[in-house]
Image: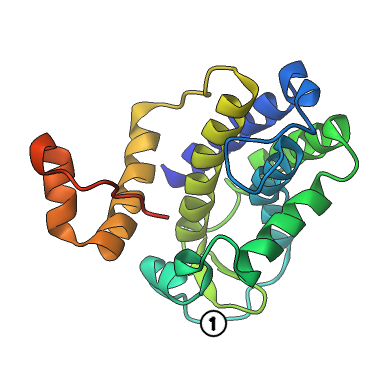
Amino acid sequence: MIREAYLQGAAAAADLMGRPSVAAAWNEPSVLPGYRVAGLCGHLARNIVLVEPLLAAPAGGAHPIPLLDHYTGDDWLDADPQSGEHLAIRERGKKAAADGPESLAERVSGAVSRLNRAIPAQPADRVVDLPGMWSLTLDDFLLTRLVEVVVHCDDVAVSVGVPTPELPTAYYEETIALLSRLAMRRHGPIALVRALSRSERAPGTISAF
């Protein structure tokens, strides 16, 4: 299911980035602090266009780490938004969008078309090596990208005043399940129980990020 969910999410992102409303707001601030719409779209696009070279690279034979270790093994998740890690992430988004909205939309659309052929052809036990980091199973890696695509499609849509692309409920369930695990890591299980069941005792936030 994860592979199909990712491909459908990537297609929705490509469609969103190709809309005239995105191009019209390209240089405007987005709803995500620190990002203009251009940089936000570039950041979103990287979760699609960078999957291709990872699939093309031969697997190095490393043992994949557990999914949650992907998040706990790096500093960005808990880093301040003005930290060097987040500044670097924003700069990479700006660079990806440097050639303008039409060029970026074409790159993403082309990548989605090729991924629709490449991803289903991968073996069930495929492992991808993340340069300078570690290895994940392909399905775990695509789930991390699906979360990024779902979250940032919403950011882009709200930023430019269009409806957020909708995916099948089952695909959202996969995204929400991972976000819930990350939120529980950050806030503890009781905070999530209260937020989901007791509005009078709900904490101010249970954001996973």
Disc 1 marks which amino acid? Answer: Ala
Give percent across and percent down for residue 99: 91, 41
Mark 1, residue position: 62
Give percent across and percent down for residue 68: 37, 67
Give percent across and percent down for residue 7: 57, 38
Q: Please give the name of the residue rendered at 9% of the width and 37% of the height, measured from the top-left corner.
A: 200
Q: Is residue 89 left or right of residue 1?
A: right
Q: Is residue 157 above or below residue 100?
A: above
Q: How are the residues colored? A: rainbow
Q: Residues within 10 Å of mark 1 (few under 14, many from 20)?
A: few
Q: Please give the name of the residue rendered at 16% of the width and 43% of the height, measured from the top-left corner.
A: 202
Residue 186 is drawn in which quadrant? bottom left
Instruction: Name the quarter where the N terminus is drawn.
Output: top left
Q: Is residue 36 above or below residue 193?
A: above
**Residue reaching furthest to the right:** 99
Give percent across and percent down for residue 42: 73, 45
Q: Please give the name of the residue rendered at 61% of the width and 50% of the height, measured from the top-left corner.
A: 121
Report whether residue 203 is seen.
yes
Q: Is residue 85 above or below residue 161?
A: below
Q: Is residue 31 left or right of residue 26?
A: left
Instruction: Name the quarter where the C terminus is drawn.
Output: bottom left
Report whether residue 8 is seen.
no
Q: Is residue 25 left or right of residue 86?
A: right
Q: Regarding mark 1 in the picture, which secondary structure is present there?
A: loop
